[in-house]
């Protein structure tokens, strides 16, 4: 009788299943696939949504571009030089919401078969320039006003600067075109909120602070919101990890009572370039790939651009592998092409003017900012001598201008005065490409001299190899706009870039500059105050810098 009971028990055990009966092998595989793919789908949806908001493209176009189904852009496979303006401004809730606190032009020269050359050109916000918002009737103002005027649609009269949120970028781009002499085809406008959120979204950035400095006049808040206080901020030399708020302060700081070198426009422009490159490096790092949706979300509602998804994709593919160390950094400031009005002794506010009122000198330089890689590959030692007799530090100026372009340059000081600039190849032909580039740039015939006699017979310099440039009186005349300007360089990139070098001719806007510009001996015009100056408020201190020494 026990045997049937045991048999019954075995039958009950055989009916036991460790998994539900509905979970077949195929269904289990599908479930595992769903668990694995769901985060990827969510990630992809967030990326597509973020790119759609950022570029103003519909999600279908973004998806097609991401999947490489259809992503057509004129920028892809182009050999033309590409110029994109970056505008940084306070945005809603800030004084002068659309006055561009930061202006930078990123210039890209594609090189078939090799990495493109890239230059970051910083433009000071206080530069007084003609702004043509009405079509042939420019008014005179700081360059940072152009974006704000276009965004507000007043005093802009031209329809292209009114009616949408891109009027500011369009007017600012045109203003840059007129004074820089290079075509700015696209723009990106970013407010402080987007800047700060972008840095935070990638977990902060690591920045190598070049110099220690303390700014005891950094704004604590916004005057139009009742907070006119200032606070003290300090940065210590060395590698620093910064969150968005700290990086914004680092990029905006304009004063440094303990380090005058960090109180200049040049220093602030350089800090902005450091932050930009740090964000780029963080975004492109392997560890930050998961933060891309957060970055796009942070930027989407606080960025204005005329770049569509296809253009954005083409630019990314063009520059993604470029070594940041190879990027040319140019700052237009009062150490080179501009001079200050003399604030506060000779004028009531900060203004900067171009030495050359036709802008020809500046335009010539920017058109030649990308020497051919074969020229730079010579690594030729270049000595610059000042033979102008003007005592204006021409050799120092040109050493600092040629160095960022990738040349190895030394300042040879002054030498005897000469009427015309000379470029002398002392290398026996080894540095012939460099010598010829410099001769073309200054519009003179190349001279050659045996290395053994170069130092004594011709140029009065200890350099016996490489290339020597002796700046003549003609170079100083051209620099100040008193001559016809520098000639076009036939060896530059302008022809291959799809536009002519206009350096030798003043721009239309520059020629029609209104007579309100003050001469150097007279203080520049003072804009009428829009409101009485705020009552000073106590200084608010942020450690570690709380007291002046």
Image (spheres, grey):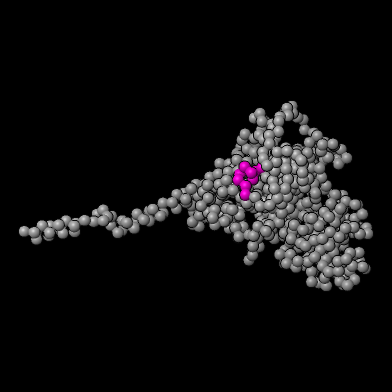
Image point (83%, 40%), residue name: 342
Seen from the viewer's position, the closer of residues 10 and 356 is 10
Location of residue 524 in the rendering, given as x and y in whole percent from the top left corner: 82, 37
Viewer-side residue, 349 vs 375: 349
| Horizontal relation, residue 286 to residue 505: left or right | left
Q: Is residue 248 magenta?
A: yes
Above or below for 379 versus 197: below
**Image location (x, y in percent) of residue 546:** 70, 38
- The quadrant of the image that shows the N terminus is bottom left
Q: Quadrant of the C terminus?
A: top right
Magenta residues span 241-249
Residue found 66% across the figure and 62% down from its top: 111
Q: Quadrant of residue 118?
A: bottom right
Q: Position of residue 285 (x, y in %)?
A: 57, 56
Q: Main secondary structure of the magenta part?
A: helix
Residue 274, how many percent across, how many down?
A: 67, 51
Position above or below: 519 against 112? above
What residue is at 90 percent from the left and 57 percent from the top?
A: 414
Q: Is any atom of residue 454 visible in this view? A: yes
Q: Residue furthest left?
A: 1
> In the shown orientation, is residue 360 left or right of residue 455?
left
Q: Residue at x 73, y 67 (%)?
A: 377
């Amino acid at each position: 009788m026990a045997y049937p009971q045991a048999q019954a028990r075995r039958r009950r055990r055989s009916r036991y299943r460790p998994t539900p009966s509905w979970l077949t092998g195929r269904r289990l595989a599908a479930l595992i696939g769903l668990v694995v793919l769901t985060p990827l789908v969510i990630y992809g949806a967030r990326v597509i949504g973020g790119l759609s908001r950022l570029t103003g493209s519909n999600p279908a176009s973004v998806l097609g571009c991401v999947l490489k189904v259809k992503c057509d852009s004129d920028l892809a496979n182009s050999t033309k030089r590409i110029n994109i303006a970056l505008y940084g401004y306070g945005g809603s809730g800030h004084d002068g919401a659309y006055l561009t606190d930061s202006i930078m032009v990123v210039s890209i020269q594609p090189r078939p078969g090799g990495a493109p050359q890239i230059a970051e050109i910083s433009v000071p916000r206080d530069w007084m320039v003609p702004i043509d918002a009405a079509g042939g009737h420019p008014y005179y103002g700081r360059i940072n006003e152009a974006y704000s005027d276009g965004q507000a649609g007043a005093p802009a009269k031209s329809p292209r600067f009114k009616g949408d949120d891109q009027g500011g970028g369009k007017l600012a781009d045109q203003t840059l075109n007129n004074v820089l002499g290079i075509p700015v085809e696209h723009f990106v406008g970013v407010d402080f909120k987007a800047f700060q959120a972008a840095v935070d979204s990638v977990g902060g950035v690591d920045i190598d602070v070049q110099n220690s400095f303390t700014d005891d006049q950094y704004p604590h808040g916004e005057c139009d919101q009742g907070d006119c206080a200032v606070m003290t901020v300090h940065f210590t030399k060395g590698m620093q990890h910064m969150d968005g708020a700290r990086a914004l302060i680092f990029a905006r700081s304009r004063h440094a009572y303990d380090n005058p070198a960090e109180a200049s426009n040049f220093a602030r422009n350089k800090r902005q370039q450091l932050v930009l490159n740090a964000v780029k490096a963080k975004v492109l790092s392997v560890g930050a790939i998961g933060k891309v949706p957060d970055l796009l979300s942070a930027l989407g509602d606080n960025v204005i651009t005329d770049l569509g998804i296809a253009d954005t994709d083409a630019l990314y593919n063009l520059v993604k592998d470029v070594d940041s160390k190879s990027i040319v950094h140019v700052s237009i400031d009062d150490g080179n092409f501009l001079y200050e009005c003399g604030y506060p002794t000779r004028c009531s506010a900060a203004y900067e003017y171009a030495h050359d009122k036709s802008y020809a000198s500046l335009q010539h330089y920017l058109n030649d900012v990308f020497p051919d890689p074969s020229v730079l590959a010579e690594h030729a030692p270049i000595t610059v001598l000042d033979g102008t007799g003007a005592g204006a530090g021409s050799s120092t100026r040109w050493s600092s201008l040629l160095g960022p372009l990738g040349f190895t340059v030394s300042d040879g000081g002054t030498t005897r005065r000469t009427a015309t600039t000379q470029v002398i190849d002392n290398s026996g032909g080894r540095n012939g490409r460099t010598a010829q580039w410099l001769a073309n740039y200054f519009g003179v015939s190349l001279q050659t001299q045996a290395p053994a006699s170069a130092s004594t017979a011709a140029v009065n310099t200890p350099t016996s190899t490489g290339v020597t440039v002796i700046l003549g009186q003609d170079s100083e005349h051209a620099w100040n706009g008193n001559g016809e300007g520098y000639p076009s360089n036939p060896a530059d990139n302008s022809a291959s870039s799809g536009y002519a070098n206009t350096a030798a001719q003043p721009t239309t806007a520059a020629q029609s500059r209104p007579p309100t510009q003050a001469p150097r001996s007279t203080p520049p015009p003072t804009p009428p105050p829009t409101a009485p100056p705020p009552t000073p408020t106590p200084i608010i201190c942020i450690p570690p810098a709380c007291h002046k020494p």
